Image (cartoon, rainbow, N blue to C red):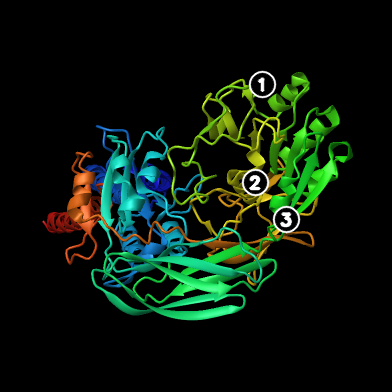
């Protein structure tokens, strides 16, 4: 046996007071004078023995009554000697956005909070609880009843759902106590992963399922543009993928598209249990950034009705062509035909450090020898995450070239190869060529290459165009934007510059050098947002909109800025919406934040499926409860309490004392009369 309030037991020391009174009589004695005291002494001795017996009995009874009352107030409970493990009561309340759907008694989150509070109220005073939500905390405190109820009242929606199996598996395995998890959730399959729970004999689970009135949902799954580049005053085509999870065809569903200077409403029909792509064409009116919202009208599930997007308007891409002895004039001619590019030619002798910040693409055009200063500048250019395209000239000094190639991660040249220089194949599966060809011809045999450079294979590149001699003609590195042509454009080596494939790879390389801007950032799916560092501005970065302005945690790496949205220092007020990112007085970009679409896919575990998934916990404490059931009843394990027994024992002793005194007085009085 143990006590909930052992400090009360100190009151047992007060029992010494009546014992001391009994041992030391403080009653004043009266003196009576008689002529003969023999008879009186006999009577006094007899009465004193009887009186002492009576006082001892009353003292014992009253001490027992007093002790019983004190022990009752100390709350005696059972102490199971079979196990020294105390059970931890861990209540998980799913506060993800899917719990905003309506159930029988209101929103599912409100239902789960009320049922959890009822569960706590039905437990005994002294029980401890840990309340866990989707908020990713390092630890959760142990709370008493009142603290746990207050904590539950403060729970609001969390945009990033945590998987239930992850919560249970990550719980401190060093805890020696048994752990009883009470799971209040709608148990969506794609956010629960119950099959991944690690079996543990110390874990007990009570799965309390909350069910919405209906599982219907219409939501915007994703968006994209037909053209990856956004040019001012040019035609744009925005594609919107909408999914209908309802088992019926829907008609005239309202879809609103709002950009800065565009506001359109469409009414669409959606087939049951299918998705549909809606395309919207418009002319771009913005010059730097555009931002907006796509809204679908769905009253059944509102948390995913809005979809936010931002994108940067592409300006002319500056291209620097560095000419050497064997340069080709056709490179500039190709780019001059496109308004998207601003090309400039210089000689290798005039190449300085200033050029690396002014251009997004540098092309080495027919350089035979490359000096150490140019190598240093080009390495700095690559560190800025920009694009380098190399057309070597007729190489005379392989050593200096190979030093440069090795330093930037390219394979080095070995010798000139004059055999097998027919173009044999193109790597159509790579993203470089995917938008270039509508059909993929199998046989090429293009005879525009006379001589090429054999390379030493370092396995750090992707071949894009291959020759019959097993040497790649055009290749790119894995993790850097560097492209290499393994021949020259000099007519002695090739006539490739007059081939249609030549202009295709030039334009595609330039297009790949344009830094694309993410249309959105999805909460919970990525931890870091990467931005290109455009200046050496040392001011802090701010993320703002009309409601918020805060400095996020970020770091600089490889001339880029990485913003950490999963950090605990990111305020909870970062909700889906449109934001602007600035540094000092400079605007870096616009950004749109959306909820993850995982919860939009409505697919719940049934009670039978829950039983099947959690059957690995083979013990009598695993329960599967439908909270909508009229027989819903769940109680936290209570201790065996004995305070009532001690109160009853004290009352019994009081009755015995009263009967004893009554019996004693009646018998004593009769004896005196006789």
- Residue 320 screen position, x and y as percent: 77, 46
Dot 3 corresponds to which residue?
A: 336
- Residue 295 screen position, x and y as percent: 46, 74
Is label 1 or label 2 in front? Answer: 1
Pick the front one: 644 or 208: 208
Pick the front one: 384 or 504: 504
- Looking at the rendered structure, which numbered label has been put on residue 416? 1
Pick the front one: 113 or 81: 113
| Residue 466 visible in the displayed image | yes
Question: For this view, does 501 lie left or right of residue 175?
Answer: right
| Residue 73 visible in the displayed image | no
Question: What SS does tag 2 mark?
Answer: helix
Question: For this view, does 183 lie left or right of residue 359?
Answer: left
Dot 2 corresponds to which residue?
A: 506
Question: For this view, does 641 lie left or right of residue 575?
Answer: left
Contact (CB < 8 A) between labels 1 and 3?
no
């Amino acid at each position: 046996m143990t006590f909930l309030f052992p400090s009360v037991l100190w009151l047992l020391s007060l029992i010494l007071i009546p014992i001391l009174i009994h041992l030391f009589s403080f009653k004043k004695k009266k003196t009576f004078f008689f002529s003969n005291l023999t008879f009186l002494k006999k009577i006094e001795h007899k009465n004193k023995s009887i009186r002492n017996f009576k006082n001892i009995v009353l003292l014992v009874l009253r001490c027992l009554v007093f002790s019983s009352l004190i022990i009752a107030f100390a709350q005696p409970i059972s102490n199971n000697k079979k196990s020294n493990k105390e059970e931890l009561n861990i209540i998980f309340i799913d506060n993800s956005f899917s719990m905003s759907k309506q159930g029988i008694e209101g929103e599912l989150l409100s239902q789960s909070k009320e049922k959890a509070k009822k569960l706590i109220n039905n437990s005994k005073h002294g029980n401890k609880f840990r309340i866990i939500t989707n908020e990713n905390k390092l630890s959760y405190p142990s709370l008493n009843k009142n603290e746990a109820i207050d904590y539950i009242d403060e729970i609001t929606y969390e945009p990033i759902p945590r998987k239930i199996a992850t919560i249970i598996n990550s719980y401190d395995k060093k805890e020696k106590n048994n752990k009883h998890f009470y799971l209040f959730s709608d148990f969506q399959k794609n956010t629960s992963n119950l099959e991944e729970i690690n079996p543990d004999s110390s874990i007990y689970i009570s799965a309390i399922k909350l069910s919405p009135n209906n599982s219907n949902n219409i939501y915007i799954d994703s968006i994209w543009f037909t053209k990856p580049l956004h040019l001012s005053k040019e035609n744009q085509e925005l594609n919107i993928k909408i999914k209908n999870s309802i088992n019926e065809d829907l008609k005239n569903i309202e879809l609103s598209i709002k950009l800065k200077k565009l506001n359109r409403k469409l009414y669409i029909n959606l087939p049951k249990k299918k998705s549909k792509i809606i395309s919207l064409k418009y002319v771009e009116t913005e010059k730097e950034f555009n931002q907006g919202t796509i809204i679908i009208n769905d009253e059944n599930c509102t948390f995913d009705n809005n979809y936010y997007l931002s994108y940067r308007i592409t300006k002319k891409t500056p291209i620097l062509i560095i000419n050497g002895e064997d340069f080709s004039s056709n490179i500039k001619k190709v780019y001059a035909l496109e308004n998207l590019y601003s090309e400039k030619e210089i000689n290798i002798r005039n190449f300085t450090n200033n050029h690396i910040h002014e251009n997004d693409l540098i092309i080495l055009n027919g350089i035979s020898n490359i000096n150490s200063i140019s190598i240093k500048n080009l390495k700095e250019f690559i560190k800025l995450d920009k694009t380098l395209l190399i057309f070597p000239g007729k190489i005379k000094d392989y050593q200096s070239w190979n030093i440069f190639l090795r330093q930037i991660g390219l394979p080095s040249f070995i010798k000139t190869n004059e055999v097998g220089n027919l173009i044999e194949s193109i790597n159509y599966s790579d993203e470089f060529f995917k938008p270039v060809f509508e059909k993929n011809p199998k046989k090429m045999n293009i005879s525009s290459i006379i001589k090429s450079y054999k390379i030493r294979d370092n396995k750090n590149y992707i071949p894009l165009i291959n020759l019959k001699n097993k040497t790649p003609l055009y290749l790119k590195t894995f993790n850097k934007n560097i492209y290499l042509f393994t021949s020259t454009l000099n007519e002695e080596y090739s006539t490739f510059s007059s081939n249609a494939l030549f202009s295709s790879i030039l334009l595609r390389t330039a297009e790949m050098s344009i830094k694309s801007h993410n249309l959105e950032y999805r909460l919970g799916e990525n931890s870091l947002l990467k931005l290109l560092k455009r200046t050496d501005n040392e001011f802090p970065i701010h993320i703002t909109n009309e409601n918020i302005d805060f400095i996020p945690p970020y770091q600089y790496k490889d001339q880029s800025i990485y913003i950490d949205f999963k950090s605990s220092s990111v305020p909870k007020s970062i909700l889906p919406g449109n934001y602007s990112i600035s540094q000092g007085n400079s605007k870096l970009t616009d950004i749109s934040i959306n909820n993850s679409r995982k919860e939009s896919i409505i697919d719940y575990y049934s009670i039978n499926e829950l039983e099947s998934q959690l059957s690995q916990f083979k013990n009598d404490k695993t329960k599967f409860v439908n909270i909508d059931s009229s027989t819903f009843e769940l109680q936290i394990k209570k201790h065996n309490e004995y305070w009532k027994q001690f109160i009853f024992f004290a009352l019994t002793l009081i009755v015995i004392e009263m009967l004893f005194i009554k019996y004693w007085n009646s018998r004593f009085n009769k004896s005196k009369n006789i």
